[in-house]
């Protein structure tokens, strides 16, 4: 199922596809105590030794850091060093903790290179639910 996602501009890479599963409808219903699979296919415009993910929950225009178990992109399906012009599949999990409040928000997922420049950034509306 095609989901409506927002790909925001990134200087050093471009996104081909983002999959969040399971998420059959928008906004994604994220159930507490469940982990969701994230799969991002992107191509890099630069070379980088490493990459690091930063995930936020965006509420009322405030970014709240969302901890993920493995922020290192090189341990998340990306073969490092990253080469210019190559395509990569980034795989990770988004754990929804049971103590999170039941609210609607936007998840923002960034991957930065070793110069702290954006390889990709995307946003998706979610509803956290019990």
Image: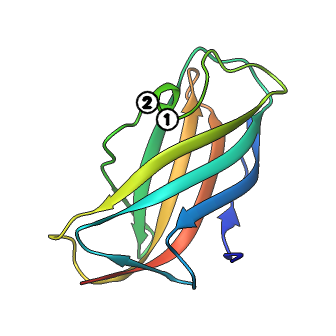
User: Could you tell me which secondary element the residue under label 2 belongs to?
Assistant: loop
Judge left or right: residue 25 versus residue 71: right
Judge left or right: residue 47 versus residue 110: right
Which residue is more in the foreground, 71 or 33?
A: 33
Residue at coordinates 33% horizontally, 55% vertically from top-left?
Answer: 66
Q: Are marks 1 and 2 in contact (CB under 8 Å)?
A: yes
The residue where tag 2 is placed is: 72
User: Could you tell me which secondary element the residue under label 1 belongs to?
Assistant: loop
In the displayed structure, 54 sits above or below 63; it is: above
In the displayed structure, 127 sits above or below 71; it is: below
Marks 1 and 2 sit apart, C-alpha to C-alpha, by 7 Å
- Pinpoint residue 70: horizontal percent, then vertical percent: 36, 37
Q: Residues within 10 Å of mark 2 (few under 14, many from 20)?
A: some
Quarter of the rendering occupied by the N terminus:
bottom right
Residue at coordinates 46% horizontally, 46% vertically from top-left?
Answer: 92
Judge left or right: residue 83 versus residue 89: right
- Pinpoint residue 119: horizontal percent, then vertical percent: 66, 37
Q: Is residue 11 visible?
A: no
In the displayed structure, 97 sits above or below 88; it is: below
Which residue is more in the foreground, 75 or 6?
A: 75
Label annotation for residue 76: 1
Q: Residue farthest to the right?
A: 85
Instruction: Name the mark nearer the viewer: 1 or 2.
Output: 1
Classify residue 4 by image quadrant.
bottom right
In the displayed structure, 67 sits above or below 81; it is: below
Q: Is residue 32 visible?
A: yes
Which residue is more in the foreground, 126 or 25?
A: 25
Classify residue 97 by image quadrant.
bottom left
């Amino acid at each position: 199922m095609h989901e409506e996602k927002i790909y925001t501009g990134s200087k050093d890479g471009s996104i081909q596809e983002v999959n969040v599963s399971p998420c059959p409808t928008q906004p994604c219903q994220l159930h507490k105590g469940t982990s969701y699979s994230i799969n991002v296919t992107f191509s890099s415009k630069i070379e980088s030794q490493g990459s690091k993910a930063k995930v936020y929950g965006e509420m009322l225009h405030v970014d709240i850091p969302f901890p993920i178990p493995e922020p290192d992109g090189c341990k998340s399906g990306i073969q490092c060093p990253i080469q210019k012009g190559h395509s990569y599949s980034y795989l990770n999990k988004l754990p929804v903790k049971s103590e999170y409040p039941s609210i609607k928000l936007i998840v923002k997922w960034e991957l930065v290179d070793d110069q702290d420049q954006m390889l990709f950034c995307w946003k998706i509306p979610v509803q956290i639910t019990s």
